[in-house]
Each structure stands twice: as structure tokens, then as C-alpha cells.
Amino acid sequence: MRLQDKVVLITGGASGIGRAIAEGVAAEGAHTIVADLNFEGARIVADSISDAGGAARAIEMDVTRRRSVAAGLDEVWDDIGPVDVYLNNAGINRPMKFLDITEDNFERIISVNALSVLIGTQEFAKRVIRDKRRGKVINTASIAGRSGFPSFAPYSAAKAAVISLTQAGARALAADGITVNAFAPGVVATPLWEQLDKDLAAIGEEDSGFAAMADGILLDRPAQPSDIVPTAVFLASADSDYITGQVVPIEGGMILT
Ligand code: NAD
């Protein structure tokens, strides 16, 4: 029970990687807050954690809106207690061929994947500092932040921004007792990829899809969401107290630099 008595909030907790992490931290004793734009989905995850004997609460949160993030945090702080760990995990991808990318596409992808990390980190850190507590921020980056992909350049740019915000946040908040780390998954079998494969096929880019991306992974298979959980639990727990500003790749051997 490495997270006993800790309050852990995860954005995008209704689906895929976020859901697996929510269930994983709950199994380690955390009071788990499942935050998502999809409140019904978050409720299903929170109910399933409670049914399994864990402690969980679903909250509706739009990570692109400061007011929504602040209201969600205040609700948890008032009803459950201070949040110890904040996972900026919500994300989307909408592929377009490089020469077709629009301002709307770029701004939406940057907003959900990167601006959300700035807002979430700020709103969490302000409350931790106010209460003179310690805290941990964990961000979901991606291999796409370490190598730009032409069919989803805004997503790659957003995930590179997540890595930069992890480093900047670590430097900004270390003196306040807040660590900021990230993990960078490779190709993970989640609903995000089901939609991405359909969208890539629609623009004639099926060769950049799940199967093609998974081909050549050194460990010879794509990831399941459960492959991400141990690293997330480690970064959320006291075992990682002397680590900050780092990005842990979890991709079976894809980018070796
Ligand atoms: P997913 O689509 O299964 O889950 C994403 C969740 O984010 C959904 O529940 C969705 O409702 C929520 N969300 C979307 N916009 C939101 C908003 N504005 N406010 C709050 N919640 C919002 O996707 P996933 O594959 O589990 O992805 C989770 C994270 O992992 C994302 O940041 C993604 O970029 C990243 N990632 C995924 C992969 C992969 O291969 N699946 C690889 C690397 C990184």
C-alpha cells in the first residue's frame, strides 16, 4: 500500500491509460479522484473502484478551462482533503496532413494536451503552497514529444511542450517541495488509437496507424494501459522523492537516444 492516505487526482481518468492508473493507484490505497470531461465515464470508473473496496470520487473537469480545474480542486480540497498527487493525463489527437493543418486544429490540440498541463500544475501548486504542504505533479508526455510525426505535428509539438513544462515546473517549484515528473508512453492500445486509426484512414494516412507504429518495437508488442501503471505508481509514491524534472520513457524500445 504505497499510497495509503494519499489523495491522487488524475485527469482523463475515464478511459485508457488514465483509467488504468486510477485503478492502479486506488489498489495502492490512494483516495482516487477521477477527473474527466466525460463525467459519466468518470463515474463508471469511480464506481468500479469503490465496488472493488477502494476509495474514489468522480468529478467533471475540462482541463482547458482554468475555472473548471480550480472548481474541481476546491471541491476535492473541501470534501475529501488536500490533493497530494496531480496527474495531468487528459489528451486528444486529431491527425491532419502536415500541409493541411489549420490554426483551429493546432490550437485545440495544444490547448487540451499542453495548456492543460500549465493550468493544472499552477492551480494544484498554488493550493499546495498556500497550505504549506508537499506535492507531486506527474505529466503524460509521449514518444511524439521526443520525435515529431508528420501526420500529427500539433500533437508532437504539444507533447514536446509537456516535456518543457515538466522541466520548467520542476525548476520553478522545487523550493516549494513540489516535484514535477513525466512519463512518455509509446504505442498503447486505448480508445485514443481506435479513433486515431479511423481519422488517419480518412485522410489517406493509414500507413502511420497503430499497426505501423507498433512494428519494430524492440520488445515486440505494443503496450497495454497496464504497462504504464507501475511507473505512474512509482512517480506518485515516496519512492520517487529524490527525482524531479525527469521524463521516463515507457515504450518497449522505440527511441534510443
Ligand atoms: P483516451 O482517449 O482513452 O483517454 C483520454 C481521456 O481524456 C478521455 O477520457 C477523455 O474524455 C479525456 N479528455 C479529453 N479532453 C478532455 C478535457 N478537455 N478535459 C478533461 N478530460 C478530457 O486516451 P489515452 O490513450 O488513454 O491517452 C491518455 C494520455 O496518454 C493522453 O495524454 C495521450 O496523449 C497520452 N498518450 C497516449 C498514447 C497511446 O498510444 N494511447 C501514447 C502516448 C501518450
Image (cartoon, rainbow, N blue to C red):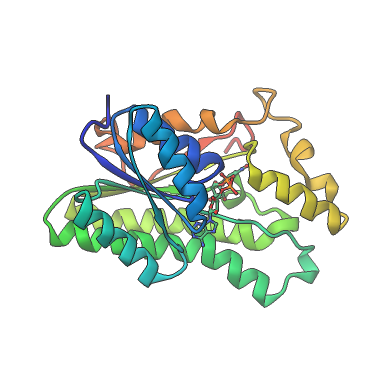
Examine the rendered structure and indicate whether residue 207 appears above or below residue 189.
below
The residue lying furthest to the bottom in this view is 103
Give the residue at x 48% y 42%: 44
Residue 190 in picture, x, y percent from top left? 63, 40
Which image quadrant is residue 16 in? top right
* Along the line of sight, the residue nearer the viewer: 215 or 44: 44
* Along the line of sight, the residue nearer the viewer: 245 or 91: 91
Q: Is residue 203 left or right of residue 72?
A: right
Which image quadrant is residue 53 in? top left
Give the residue at x 78% y 55%: 199
Examine the rendered structure and indicate whether residue 252 appears above or below residue 14.
above
Residue 156 in picture, x, y percent from top left? 62, 56
Q: Is residue 141 left or right of residue 80?
A: right
* Along the line of sight, the residue nearer the viewer: 144 or 193: 193
Examine the rendered structure and indicate whether residue 49 appears above or below residue 155.
above
Q: Quarter holding the C terminus?
A: top right
Give the residue at x 38% y 67%: 68
Q: Quarter holding the N terminus?
A: top left
Residue 35 in picture, x, y percent from top left? 42, 52
Give the residue at x 56% y 60%: 158
Kindly tell me whether residue 172 is visible in this rendering: no
Number of residue marks: 0
Which image quadrant is residue 25 in? top left
Residue 170 in picture, x, y percent from top left? 31, 53
Kindly tell me whether residue 94 is visible in this rendering: yes
The residue lying furthest to the right in this view is 204
